[in-house]
């Protein structure tokens, strides 16, 4: 009994001052704080998962489409051409101007006399006169000049729209190429990291064998040399990865792109390589629109040599400084016929004809070049598919060879050089398979680029659904 009391006394004296008795529970936060913390974790969990997973290629392409400065500049160019269409259309409506004038004569005279009455009052005479009013001009497009210029402006607007589509398409494919390049580089890095881990394990095994006097230190030095060489190659790959990330960030109008990128493992689908789709390429559409605009300019140049007509009208309130004034109305129809201007109008027609020939030849060259790009892309596709199949078979053989060589090395049947060679072959096979797969995806995207389509992983359906919803919401509004 006394011993138990001493024990309890020692236990109580060992407690720090201010500590709670044993029967008290520890202090807990209020229930409200617990609920707030739980709600905050629920809200932050999706963002934490997204940050850990990184943005996939579809998300990156949408961000490039939304933020790329080059695409914004192309959009601004379409706004410029749209304004030019409005300017050309405004020529149909003529002009209306307000005016004011001051006239000083060397002697007194009538203020806009309409007739000569018998008695003329002194208020009608003044050598200093001023007037104000409006004048209007309404052109009559009898020669088709205004219509031809409006048609040319509309075709240039179409060319700007197609040019924006071409800029968008090339930006998307460039971003996809950078992203696939990062995927291939990451796969190379993963293969080298596996080789590093294998070499480190071999070094530990060799050190144990040296301590047991079953191996000589030279074997370890050979493994260490190979390990440092692999680390150097890994550093070069990481530098290349940073270059690709910086280039991709520039397309996204961002300072950097640090999202984790995993090597791609899915196989690409068979692309549609119908040669008739070449005519739908935005660069071809843009050049065709420019050709139509040049033809309209040529018609405008010919129309400028034909007679032109306009209706002019004016109202003027004229009065003197010392007398009452009078209103003057005037309406006139003006018909003009160009006779001679030193050959300038004829030279404009010749210039327009030459411009049409230039654009026709450029369009033909672009079509031939597009067909050659499609043929080359199809050849790249077939070659990339064959390389991937060969790389898969090579990786399987390298895995089995490395397993056998590792067992033989542990049994002392082969040298460290043989083991290093087998593990290097395995790392190279893994890297070759990953790079072959990314090259296969790139070859498919080159086919799509030759046909004027977005990259294979561009979320076309999601974008169309979003645009349909936006248009429906605007209609409801």
Image (cartoon, rainbow, N blue to C red):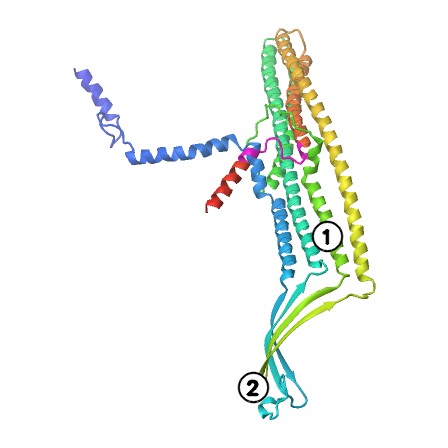
Report the residue that reaches farthest toward the right: 342
Q: In this view, does 205 lie above or below 465?
A: above
Q: In what element is the residue under mark 2?
A: loop
Q: Splitting the image into 4 quarters, where does residue 233 fall?
A: top right
Percent across and percent down for residue 436 are 67, 24
- What predominant SS class does the magenta segment belong to? loop
Percent across and percent down for residue 127 are 64, 88
Percent across and percent down for residue 468 are 52, 39
Residue at the spot x=59%, y=8% of the render? 212
Q: Splitting the image into 4 quarters, where does residue 219 fall?
A: top right
Residue 451 colored in magenta in the image:
yes
Residue at the spot x=27%, y=31% of the render? 27
Residue 144 colored in magenta in the image:
no
User: In the rendered image, which residue does mark 1 sit on?
Assistant: 296
Q: In this view, does 47 lie above or below 313?
A: above
Q: Give the range drawn in magenta.
A: 448-462
Distance CA(mark 1)–CA(mark 2): 53 Å
């Amino acid at each position: 009994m006394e011993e138990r009391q001493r024990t309890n006394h020692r236990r109580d004296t060992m407690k720090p001052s201010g500590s709670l008795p044993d029967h008290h529970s520890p202090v807990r936060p209020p229930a409200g704080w617990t609920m707030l913390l739980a709600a905050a974790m629920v809200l932050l969990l999706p963002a934490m998962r997204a940050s850990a997973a990184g943005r996939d290629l579809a998300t990156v392409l949408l961000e490039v489409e939304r933020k790329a400065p080059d695409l914004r500049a192309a959009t601004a160019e379409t706004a410029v051409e749209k304004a030019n269409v409005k300017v050309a259309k405004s020529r149909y409506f003529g002009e209306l101007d307000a005016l004011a004038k001051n006239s000083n004569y060397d002697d007194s005279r009538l203020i806009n006399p309409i007739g000569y009455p018998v008695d003329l009052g002194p208020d009608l005479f003044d050598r200093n006169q001023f007037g104000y009013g409006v004048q209007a001009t309404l052109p009559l497009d009898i020669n088709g000049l205004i219509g031809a210029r409006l048609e040319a402006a509309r075709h240039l607007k179409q060319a700007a729209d197609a040019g924006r589509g071409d800029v968008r398409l090339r930006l998307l494919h460039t971003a996809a190429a950078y992203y696939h390049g990062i995927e291939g580089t990451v796969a190379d890095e993963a293969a080298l990291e596996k080789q590093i881990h294998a070499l480190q394990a071999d070094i530990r095994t060799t050190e144990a064998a040296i301590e047991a006097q079953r191996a000589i230190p030279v074997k370890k030095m050979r493994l260490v040399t190979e390990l440092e060489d692999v680390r150097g190659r890994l550093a070069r790959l990481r530098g290349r990865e940073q270059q690709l990330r910086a280039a991709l960030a520039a397309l996204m109008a961002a300072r950097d792109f640090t999202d984790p990128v995993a090597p791609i493992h899915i196989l690409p689908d068979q692309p549609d390589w119908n040669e008739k789709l070449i005519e739908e390429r935005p660069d071809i559409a843009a050049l065709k629109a420019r050709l139509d605009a040049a033809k309209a300019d040529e018609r405008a140049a010919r129309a400028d040599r034909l007679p032109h007509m306009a209706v002019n009208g004016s109202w003027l309130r004229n009065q003197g400084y010392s007398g009452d004034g009078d209103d003057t109305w005037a309406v006139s129809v003006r018909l003009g016929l160009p006779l001679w201007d030193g050959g300038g109008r004829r030279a404009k027609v010749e210039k327009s004809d030459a411009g049409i020939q230039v654009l026709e030849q450029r369009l033909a060259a672009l079509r031939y070049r597009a067909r050659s790009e499609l043929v080359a892309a199809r050849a790249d596709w077939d070659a990339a598919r064959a390389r991937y199949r060969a790389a898969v078979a090579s990786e399987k053989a390298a895995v089995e060879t490395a397993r056998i060589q590792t067992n033989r090395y542990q049994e002392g049947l082969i040298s460290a050089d043989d083991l290093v060679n087998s593990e290097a072959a395995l790392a190279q096979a893994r890297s070759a398979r990953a790079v072959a797969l990314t090259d296969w995806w790139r070859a498919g995207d080159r086919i799509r680029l030759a046909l004027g389509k977005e990259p294979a992983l561009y979320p076309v359906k999601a974008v169309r659904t979003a645009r349909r919803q936006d248009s429906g919401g605007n209609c409801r509004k």
